[in-house]
Image (spheres, helix red, strand yellow):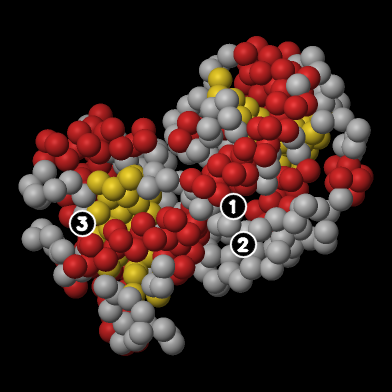
Amino acid sequence: MTDTNVKTGIAFYAPLKSPLHPIPSGDRKIARLFIRALEQGGYHVELASQLRTFDKRGDSHRQQRLIIIAKKEATRIMRRWNKQGFRPHAWFSYHLYYKAPDLIGPIICQALHIPYIVAEASWAEKRAKGGWALYHQQVATGLKLASKVICINPRDKVALVDFYSQRQKQSHSPLVSLNAFIDDLPVNHDGSYVNSEHSQVSKDSGELTATLTREGIAAKYGLDSHLPWLITIAMMRSGDKHHSYQQLSSVVNFLQQPHQLLIIGDGIMEAEVRTLFVRHRQVKFAGALENSQIRQLLPHFELLVWPAINEALGMIFLEAQQAGVAVVAGDQGGVSSIVNNNVTGTLVDAYNAQEMSVTIDGLLKNNEKLKTMKHAAKQYVTQHHSIEASARQLNCVIQDAISNPLDNI
């Protein structure tokens, strides 16, 4: 390691999904963005572990096994660091909740007496009983230990404020708000990217495709270049994702204006999702694409449409707006914190398919309003959700945690 002696070292860990996980997702994307922001702030980021603690079903035996595995992993990590001559100044965990707590960080932070920093934690008091009770206790352990808890989703912050108001022993709250942010990769008017260096940990795999044209995209995906293009980008999973796809199919049923919709994504429910749209010849499927490919496609589309049922945040909304694509989405979870309603897009009742279709039709009929939204979308992301601004804020948060260690570490 070349930079560890001159840069402040940060141990990074994402218990739900490693930033090196082979399957794309919003979690992987945000984890990589945090790494880039930390590196941009001048830190050396060390990926501490790829152990995934996720328990989907609330199996207490699985949770007990993973707690034992995590203790051994913590010992191995510290032994490895000792051999490498590396000692982090702080531990940074991204996204812990009752299905995927951080079982490693608190152990190492207490052993090395370094600050424990958390981003995107959530707290659900109702999980104190039931199948996830053991994991729920582990989340509480992490939150009590944390020097800083960075909140991106306003919905999660409400419960965290309640958590600390009941249990707080520190002289000040560890909660810090941070806007969701996006990598500022400049996009040319043709959809290609200006060259940008990526770190090994944070870059997406897959090659950047050649310069894209509307005619080339139309030929590849069977689109009509003379019609307005809508786009949906979401994994095809069971649960909320599938419910959103079901709702989207109802929206398409109601749409009156000529259009075409390209759906990007795959997953275990792909066959079921395709069946939902089998009668709609204007709906095309692209399968799964790498993030770099998606971000080259986006500038050629008019609207990103998605019901976003129980959507935590949805980073694709930021990526679309950055590319000059307006948004029509369900007003759920943290979506309202990253879409400027009636300025960069329109948020509607996620369960009202007719309202969403009327909104989409209205924008497709009003080209001037749509153009205004698309232009505003680019400006909005640059002004409020840039990685530069977040890197500066993260630097302040981390330096404060390092300079003012808590007694409970």
Which residue matches tag 3?
147
Report x, y in % for residue 116. 24, 60
Q: Which mark is residue 53?
A: none
Which residue matches tag 1?
24
Of pointers 1 and 3, the one earlier in the residue sequence? 1
Q: Are the two marked residues, 2 and 1, in contact with CB atoms closer than 8 angstroms?
A: yes
Instruction: Residue at 49%, 33% (x, y): give it.
Output: 335
Q: Quadrant of the N terminus?
A: bottom left
Q: Horizontally, is 239 left or right of 273 in the view?
A: left
Q: Say which of marks 1 and 3 sits in front.
A: 3
Q: Is residue 213 visible?
A: yes
Cα separation, mark 1 vs mark 3, equals 30 Å
* Residue 28 vs residue 377, the one in the foreground: 377
Report x, y in % for residue 362. 72, 17
Q: Are the two marked residues, 1 and 3, in contact with CB atoms closer than 8 angstroms?
A: no
Mark 2 Cα shell of 10 Å, populated few (<14), some (14-19), many (≥20): many
Report x, y in % for residue 204. 61, 62
User: Disc 2 on helix, strand or loop?
Assistant: loop
| Snapshot quadrant of residue 200 | bottom right
User: Disc 3 on helix, strand or loop?
Assistant: loop
* Residue 310 vs residue 394, the one in the foreground: 394
Of pointers 3 and 2, the one earlier in the residue sequence? 3
Q: Quadrant of the C terminus?
A: bottom left
Q: Say which of marks 3 and 2 sits in front.
A: 3
Q: Amino acid at mark 1?
A: Pro
Q: Amino acid at mark 3?
A: Ser
Cα separation, mark 2 vs mark 1, equals 9 Å
User: Disc 1 on helix, strand or loop?
Assistant: loop
Report x, y in % for residue 391. 42, 60
Which residue matches tag 2?
204
